[in-house]
């Protein structure tokens, strides 16, 4: 069964970036186990929509933007959709790439010790460049499986060593509660897990690995297992952080300071390995997703090794590296990306539900009633929470 694991691992690695680690850390420090239910809800929402995107990818053997473009018959609507998707994904991923590279740099600093070194960003960018330039899906898949397993061991072991109360964890996991001032954190947890560009990435990668509808069962297994594993990693971070509620946390690495009483200086290395793995995986998937979206929008059919495809991911990667080299703090750009993604996700999910119900496109593999009911219910939740998130970000700006 594990030989069938594939694109889902890249999706899981994409949402477990430095931003997710920091968000989960803050959730644990500020609210203990109380928001574990929000993480579980995020995982369920991600599985539901990613399965739809993956199903479209394997049945049509096209990217998600290809399906949107082909099904939208009115030119003005089709062009508007392409413009919105391309702008939000490419600009948003360029902004997030700064955080991805920064997280990997932070992990290296923890592992190597000493003062921060300016060339760490170029080293990480160079590694990401080589892996993307090779242009082999199988190579990327093997590397990502290894890195996700490394993250799993690092963060889950850290959670176990805090000796949490299992009864409390189960209670908070299945009984929702909203402590005072926790709503924005709930929105952040869902927002870092249900990511618009992952829908496009998943649909494209599925068509790289599988070519027949007979493999749909393997696609679903891969989606549930990989995203579920990503959710376990996120929950492990919340649990670990819950043991350090007196700690002032600015990023995931600060959590290591609070863990030192439990297992000494090795705490720094546990968190360093986890942060590095999270940063480097997201630093690869964000440019890759942007390139796939551009390829779908402009109908490029040349594959991963095409010059145009490589130029897109190289641009995203370069932005991330330069932001660290010149110590640019792209806070306002990242806020813009959050607003863009908050607006984009409901739109993409609406189109996703529309396309996956098209008999002419999906045939017998279109959504069943229960899938539509689950999708619509979760979509309404995303719209409400997204609106609150956008309002909060605009207010802060």
Image (cartoon, rainbow, N blue to C red):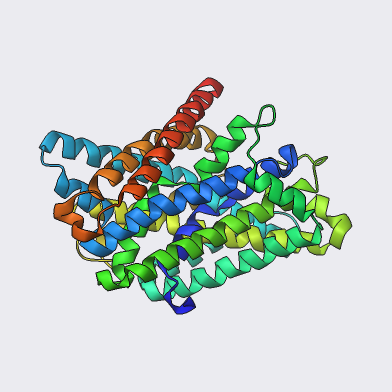
Q: Quadrant of residue 383?
A: top left
Q: Against 371, is 135 above or below?
A: below
Q: Is residue 124 left or right of residue 5?
A: right
Name the spot of residue 116 as percent of width and height, x first.
69, 54
Which residue is more in the foreground, 146 or 232?
232
The residue furthest top is 395
Position of residue 187 in the picture relative to residue 195 (left or right): right
Give whichever of 177, 96 is nearer the camera: 177
Name the spot of residue 300 as percent of width and height, x first.
20, 58
Q: In the rendered picture of this protein, how many numbered marks are placed on residues?
A: 0
The residue closer to the viewer here, 370 or 249, is 370
* Direction right: furthest residue: 261
Residue 381 vertical position relative to residue 22 in the rendered view, above or below: above
Judge whether residue 157 can be spotted in this image.
yes
Where is residue 1 drawn, in percent x and y? Answer: 46, 77
Q: Position of residue 39 (x, y in %)?
A: 58, 47
Q: Is residue 323 left or right of residue 241?
A: left
Q: Residue at x 30, y 52 (%)?
A: 368
Q: Quadrant of residue 23?
A: top right
Where residue 366 sits, quadrant-wise, is bottom left
Is residue 316 visible in this depiction of the protein? no
Could you tell me which residue is drawn at 25 percent across and 59 percent down?
Answer: 365
- Looking at the image, which residue is at 30% across and 69% down? 208
Residue 379 located left or right of residue 69: right
């Amino acid at each position: 069964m594990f030989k069938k694991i594939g694109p889902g691992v890249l999706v899981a690695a994409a949402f477990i970036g430095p931003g997710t680690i920091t968000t989960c850390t803050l959730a644990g420090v500020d609210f203990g186990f109380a928001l574990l239910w929000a993480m579980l809800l995020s995982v369920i929402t991600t599985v539901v929509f990613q399965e739809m995107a993956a199903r479209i990818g394997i049945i049509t053997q096209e990217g998600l933007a290809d399906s949107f473009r082909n099904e939208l018959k009115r030119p003005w609507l089709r062009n508007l959709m392409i413009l919105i998707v391309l702008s939000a994904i490419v600009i948003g991923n360029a902004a997030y790439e700064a955080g991805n590279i920064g997280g990997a740099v932070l992990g290296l600093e923890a592992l190597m010790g000493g003062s921060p070194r300016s060339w760490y960003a170029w080293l990480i960018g160079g590694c990401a460049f080589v892996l993307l330039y090779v242009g082999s899906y199988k190579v990327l898949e093997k590397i990502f499986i290894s890195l996700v397993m490394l993250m799993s061991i690092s963060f889950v072991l850290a959670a176990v060593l805090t000796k949490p109360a299992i009864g409390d964890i189960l209670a908070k996991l299945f009984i929702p509660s909203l402590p005072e001032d926790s709503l924005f954190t709930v929105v952040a947890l869902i927002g870092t897990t249900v990511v618009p560009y992952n829908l496009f990435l998943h649909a494209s990668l599925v068509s790289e690995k599988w070519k027949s509808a007979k493999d749909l069962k393997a696609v679903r297994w891969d989606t549930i297992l990989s995203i579920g594993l990503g959710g376990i990693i996120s929950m492990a971070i919340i649990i670990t952080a819950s043991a350090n509620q007196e700690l002032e946390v600015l990023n995931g690495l600060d959590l290591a300071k609070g863990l030192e009483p439990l297992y000494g200086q090795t705490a720094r290395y546990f968190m360093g390995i986890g942060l590095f793995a999270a940063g480097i995986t997201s630093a690869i998937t964000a440019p890759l997703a942007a390139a796939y979206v551009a390829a779908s929008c402009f109908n490029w059919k040349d594959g991963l090794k095409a010059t145009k495809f490589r130029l897109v991911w190289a641009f995203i990667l370069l932005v991330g590296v330069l932001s660290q080299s010149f110590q640019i703090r792209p806070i306002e750009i990242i806020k813009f990306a959050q607003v863009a993604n908050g607006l984009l996700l409901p739109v993409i999910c609406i189109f996703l539900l529309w396309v996956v119900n098209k008999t002419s496109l999906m045939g017998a593999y279109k959504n069943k009633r229960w899938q539509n009911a689950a999708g619509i219910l979760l979509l309404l939740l995303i719209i409400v929470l997204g609106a609150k998130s956008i309002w909060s970000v605009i207010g802060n700006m």
